[in-house]
Amino acid sequence: MFLYNMDDVDKLSLLFDKVIKRVAKLKRNDSNFKHEKVWEKIKKILKPLDKYKMDGWKNIRKDIKESILDLPEYYYDDNGKRKITPEHFLMEQLRIPERQDPTLKEIIHIAFNAGLYKGSKKIDKEKNNMDDIRTYIRKEEIKKLADLLDDDIINGILGII
């Protein structure tokens, strides 16, 4: 078992944080980490739960959004090939709530992008709490989504990363 005697809020919050930490470590240790393939595997585990949606996302302050979206997202390497900057992953943390339904899969997708950002930048803490689950959803929603988690789902995700 993954967790013992934990309430549901802690279970989802801990999974969110573990995804960030493990993905950051993978990215730090391998700059060519094939994150798209890994995310596809995690997405497959969570897809059946997409029918369960939260009431909605929390709003992120406009000044925080603007400061992030003003960062460079792409650059061109010496061969003229377009590459993403680490800030792309931070921007994705804003875009997911704007473009996707509020599901458990998308919450974990935010954590996955936070891990990619932290691993790329080699930092431990993001500014503006962009690596905190409570930035995106309310405590009641964390509880509602945590009720969907079982050990198979948690272990399946953590077994991939």
Image (cartoon, rainbow, N blue to C red):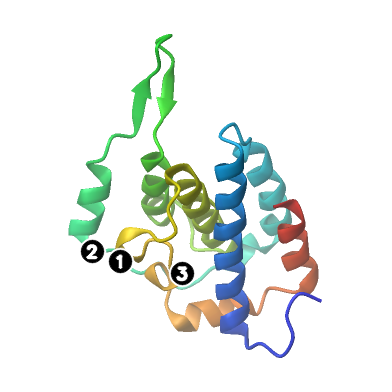
Disc 1 target residue: 59
Q: Is residue 85 above or below residue 50?
A: above
> Residue farthest to the left?
63
- Report the residue at 41% width, 39% height from top: 86
Quick check: marks 3 and 2 in contact, CB under 8 Å? Answer: no
Label 1 sits on a secondary structure element that is: loop
The spot of residue 97 in percent (x, y) is 41, 57
On residue 133, the disc is 3
Distance from disc 2 to disc 1, alpha carbons, whole Å, reads 6 Å
Q: Amino acid at mark 1?
A: Asn
Q: Amino acid at mark 2?
A: Arg
Q: Position of residue 151 (x, y in %)?
A: 78, 73
Quadrant of the snapshot with the N terminus: bottom right
Between 37 and 148, the residue placed more toward the observer is 37
Is the residue 54 above or below the residue 8 in the image? above
Question: Would you call the spot at circle 3 few (<14 residues within 10 Å), some (14-19), or many (20 or more)?
Answer: many
**Structural crowding at the residue carrying mark 2, measured as other residues with C-alpha within 10 Å and reported as few (<14), some (14–19) or many (≥20):** few
Tell which circle, 3 or 2, labels the residue nearer the N-terminal end. 2
Q: Secondary structure at mark 3?
A: helix
Position in image of residue 80 (x %, y %)? 39, 10
Identity of the residue drawn at 37% across and 59% down: 126
Determine the residue positioned at 57% across, 80% down.
144
| Disc nearest the viewer among 2 and 1 | 2
Q: Are marks 2 and 1 in contact (CB under 8 Å)?
A: yes
Q: Which mark is residue 61?
A: 2
Which of the marked residues, 3 or 1, is nearer the chain's N terminus? 1
